[in-house]
């Protein structure tokens, strides 16, 4: 055999697949077949499916059935698809198509990337109480965060803030590629620097007034009186999600640095209200004090503390500076 055998996720290319003719009148409604659910989120269903035109398996994303007619969710879904497509960067997943299905409901398709999320990696590290798990160590984890920083810096210079950076939204692929996922909470600026807001940005309580914040069966992003995931959100995003800039992502990246260094979440609390209270009223935690046995490097602690300063004026002024700090630490002495 000329080539090594690939796992089923990346099948071998055969000529009968590459040379098959397209129908004379292609019907996009019949283009995608053999759906398998990958994940069900609070608003969307993510599936793998077969693209019969290009003969490949791809990722298909659509709104949950009960939200398909919700105009705000439709607007957010369209924004996510287009932001993901327009931010053409090595650390974003390529978007293939945005369209409507046979019932008129929105969907978009993307590259299907196989790998593990940073959440899964950190959970493995926590279970073994060490950074050295599989192909990961502290250096590799910092490199992952640096690549997240590169992606966010690119987004910021193109008028977009992610607003939902968390371990679940960072994917490390089988080829060691790092992808920033889920741009559904993205904040986009107009040409004149005004924020282009969706209705929930203007009224953070618009759809959550009747949700019990103590109900732990509801995901954090749905229970909180704001849009995002509270333990990873900046104080200003909690206070007023309309009044944020790129520095909210710098704070969120800092919470990931903290969790990588300590293997603990930076902001503690068993329910959303406690998390919000701790962010607003408690002193900024230091990684070396939270996890004295983890041998936290001084330089990484300094980066973490600067990123997560509760006063955004005291944070780094750009993600590029954070990247430079990471690269200085990773550079051999």
Image (cartoon, grey):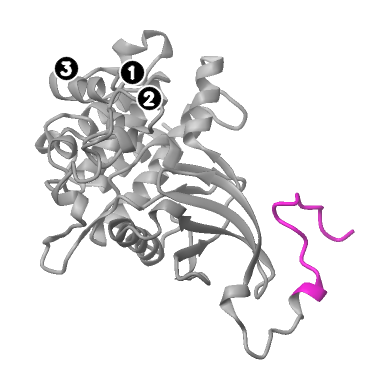
> What segment carries the magenta color?
1-17
- Comparing marks 2 and 1, which lies closer to the viewer? 2
Name the residue located 18 percent from the left edge and 43 percent from the top edge. Answer: 204
Residue 83 in percent (x, y) is at: 34, 62
48 relative to 85, above or below: above
Name the residue located 69 percent from the left edge and 70 percent from the top edge. Answer: 55
Sequence-wise, which precedes: disc 2 or disc 3?
2
Secondary structure under tag 2 reads: loop
Sequence-wise, which precedes: disc 3 or disc 1?
1
How crowded is the residue under tag 3: few (<14 C-alpha within 10 Å), some, or many (20+)? Answer: few
Give the camera-side residue of 152 and 303. Answer: 152
Residue 212 in percent (x, y) is at: 28, 28
Answer left or right for 294 relative to 5.
left
Secondary structure under tag 3 reads: loop
Can residue 91 be seen here?
Answer: no
Can residue 116 be seen here?
Answer: yes
Sequence-wise, which precedes: disc 2 or disc 1?
2
Give the labeled residue for mark 3. Answer: 282
Queried whether the magenta region covers residue 33, the answer comes back as: no
Q: Which mark is residue 216?
A: 2
Residue 107 in percent (x, y) is at: 47, 64
**Which residue is most to the top?**
293
Give the labeled residue for mark 1. Answer: 270
* Badge 2 vs badge 1, beta-carbon distance below 8 Å: yes
Q: Quadrant of the N terminus?
A: bottom right
Q: Quadrant of the C terminus?
A: top left
Gap in angstroms between the C-alphas marked 2 and 3: 23 Å
Secondary structure under tag 1 reads: loop
**Majority secondary structure in the magenta region:** loop
């Amino acid at each position: 055999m000329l080539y090594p055998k690939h796992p089923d996720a990346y099948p071998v290319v055969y000529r009968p697949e590459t040379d098959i003719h397209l129908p004379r009148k292609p019907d996009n409604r019949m283009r995608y077949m053999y759906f398998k659910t990958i994940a069900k989120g609070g608003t969307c269903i993510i599936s793998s499916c077969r693209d019969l035109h290009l003969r490949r398996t791809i990722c298909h994303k659509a709104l949950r059935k009960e939200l398909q007619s919700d105009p705000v969710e439709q607007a957010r879904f369209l924004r996510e698809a287009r932001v993901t497509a327009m931010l053409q960067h090595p650390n974003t997943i390529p978007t293939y198509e945005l369209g409507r299905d046979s019932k008129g409901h929105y969907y978009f398709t993307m590259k299907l990337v196989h790998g593990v999320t940073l959440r899964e990696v950190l959970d493995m590290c926590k279970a073994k109480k060490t950074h050295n798990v599989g192909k990961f160590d502290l250096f590799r984890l910092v490199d992952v965060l640096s690549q997240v920083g590169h992606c966010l810096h690119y987004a910021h210079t193109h008028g977009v803030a992610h607003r939902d950076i968390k371990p679940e939204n960072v994917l490390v692929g089988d080829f060691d590629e790092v992808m920033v996922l889920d741009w559904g909470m993205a904040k986009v600026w107009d040409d004149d620097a005004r924020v282009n807001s969706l209705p929930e940005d203007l009224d953070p309580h618009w759809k959550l007034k009747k949700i019990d914040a103590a109900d732990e069966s509801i995901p954090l992003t749905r229970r909180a009186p704001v849009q995002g995931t509270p333990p990873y959100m900046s104080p200003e995003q909690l206070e007023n999600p309309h009044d944020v800039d790129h520095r909210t992502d710098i704070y969120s990246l800092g919470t990931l640095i903290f969790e990588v260094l300590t293997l603990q979440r930076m902001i503690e609390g068993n329910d959303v209200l406690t998390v919000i209270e701790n962010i607003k009223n408690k002193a900024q935690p230091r990684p070396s004090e939270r996890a004295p046995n983890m041998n936290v490097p001084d330089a990484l602690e300094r980066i973490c503390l600067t990123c997560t300063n509760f006063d955004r004026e005291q944070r780094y002024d750009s993600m590029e500076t954070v990247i430079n700090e990471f690269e200085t630490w990773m550079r051999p002495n």
